[in-house]
Structure formats: structure tokens, C-alpha cells
Amino acid sequence: MSVYRELADALEGHGLLLRGGFQAAPDDRLPEGSGTVLMVGNAGPALWQVFTQAPEATDGQPDGLDRWTRRVMHEFATAFGARPVLPFEGPPYVPFQRWAQRAEAVAPSPIGILIHPDYGLWHAYRGALVFAQALDLPPADKRGRPCDNCPDAPCLNTCPVGAFTPDGYDVHACATHIGQLDGRECVDGGCLARRACPVGTSYQYTPAQASWHMQGFLGATGSG
């Protein structure tokens, strides 16, 4: 079995997905001697089901998901002979969004989140494993951006305060709204603009998962 397939199978037991990979290039901000980068992430509620049973989710300490991710990624790195890289460790921070677009068929959506042809907006990248050797990778996914065939762009027309526009994302307007009583629907069920996207609806986060992330966003913006 190839390293790629073996790792993909192992990650599934932790609610994680192997999200493609690429051969390292000089502008990837990686140490000399890096060979292959494999992206690790999640889609839908699978990760949430595993994480909520982990000690990091219930010990009352901050940044539970980041701490769980760090522990699990280091375990996989040790088992597979790789170096873990995490998007929340820095500065300097590595270009995870650019790496993701090299690894699989994702592209920025009108609201900024990377959209996937299958998962829609209901996915994330948790880390990467960097191998010194050049690994065999599956053929690249060349599917295009689903948004290009979605002329109505409901993600841009659903936000109650119009926080998403073709010109960018108004963080202040969003945070102010969901920090008030009128914004409870966004907090309790997840961002309305995100939920309006017709792609990947079967991967939508559970209300508890979506609310947990929204509460984290409120805390990060000082609105919680």
C-alpha cells in the first residue's frame, strides 16, 4: 500500500481527510530538503464527532481544537516519518490557502471561503505533513469552481447585514450583528450566507458544531 493511501485510511479514524498533496517548490516557505506536502483537513461533521470525545474538548482550557489538532498531527507525523506544519503556528505563517489550491480543486468563493466541488463551504484544513521524499500522488483534480455556474450567488444575498459583497467581507458588521439578539440564528445554526450555498449541503456542520465555531469567532473579534 502506498504511503498516500495508508495515511488516508488512518486519518479517517480521527474524522480527518487527506486533502491532496503536491511536490514542494522553492517558494513554498519550506526548509531545504522538503519533498512532498500532504494536506490534512476535514469535511462535514465527522471531525466534530471525534473531537467532542477528546480530552481537549472537555478540559476547560482554551483553544481545544487547536490543541487536539497539534497532538493528532504530531502523532501522525511520528508514525509516518514526516514533519507536521500547522496553520495556526507562527509567525511566520505558511500559505495554507495557496497550498490548498495546489493540492486539490478548491478556489475562493464569493464570500472568501475556499469552495470545494463536493464539500462546498463545509470543510477546513487542519495541517500538513511534509515528507523529505517525493511520494506518488493521485492524479490532480481538475474540476472547476462551482460558483462559476451559480449566477444567483445566494451567498452574497443572504447575510442580514450585507457583510459579504464583491468588494470584500465587513468583519465589524458581521461580528456586531451576531453579538446581538437579532443575530442568534447565525450563532445557533451557523453563518446564513454559508448555509445559502447550494453546493455540498449534505456536508453541512451540525448546529452544535456550527455554533461552537461561531462562538469562537465572536471571542476572537471581542464581540462575545
Image: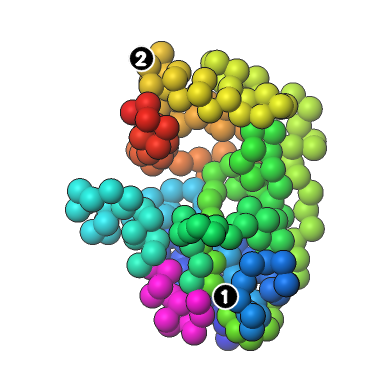
Q: According to the image, label 2 marks what residue?
A: 181
Toward which corner of the image does residue 148 lie, by quadrant? top right
Q: Position of residue 155 (x, y in %)?
A: 64, 27
- Report the side of 120 relative to 185 (left or right): right
- Report the side of 147 relative to 178 (left or right): right
Q: Position of residue 197 (x, y in %)?
A: 62, 32
Toward which corner of the image does residue 53 lie, by quadrant? bottom left
The amino acid at mark 2 is Leu
User: Which secondary structure dominates the residues rendered in magenta?
Assistant: helix
Q: Position of residue 14 (x, y in %)?
A: 40, 64
Residue 60 appears in the picture as rendered: yes
Q: Is residue 7 shown above or below 153? A: below
Task: Locate the C terminus by quadrant.
Answer: top left
**Residue at 34% from the left image edge and 60% from the top image edge:** 68
Q: Which mark is residue 93?
A: none
Residue 185 appears in the picture as rendered: no
Q: According to the image, label 1 marks what residue?
A: 130
**Residue at 54% from the left image edge and 44% from the top image edge:** 122
Q: Nearer the viewer, residue 27 or 80?
A: 27
How many residues crowd mark 1 within 10 Å: few (<14), some (14–19), many (20+)? many
- Report the side of 207 relative to 22 (left or right): left
Task: Locate the N terminus by quadrant.
Answer: bottom right
The amino acid at mark 1 is Val
How many residues crowd mark 2 within 10 Å: few (<14), some (14–19), many (20+)? few
Q: Please identify the residue farthest to the front as the structure is shown.
A: 91
Which portion, as a residue range, is magenta? 72-83
Circle 1 SS class: strand
Q: Nearer the viewer, residue 114 or 198?
A: 114
Circle 2 SS class: helix
- Report the side of 206 relative to 100 (left or right): left
Mark 1 or mark 2: whose residue is earlier in sequence: 1
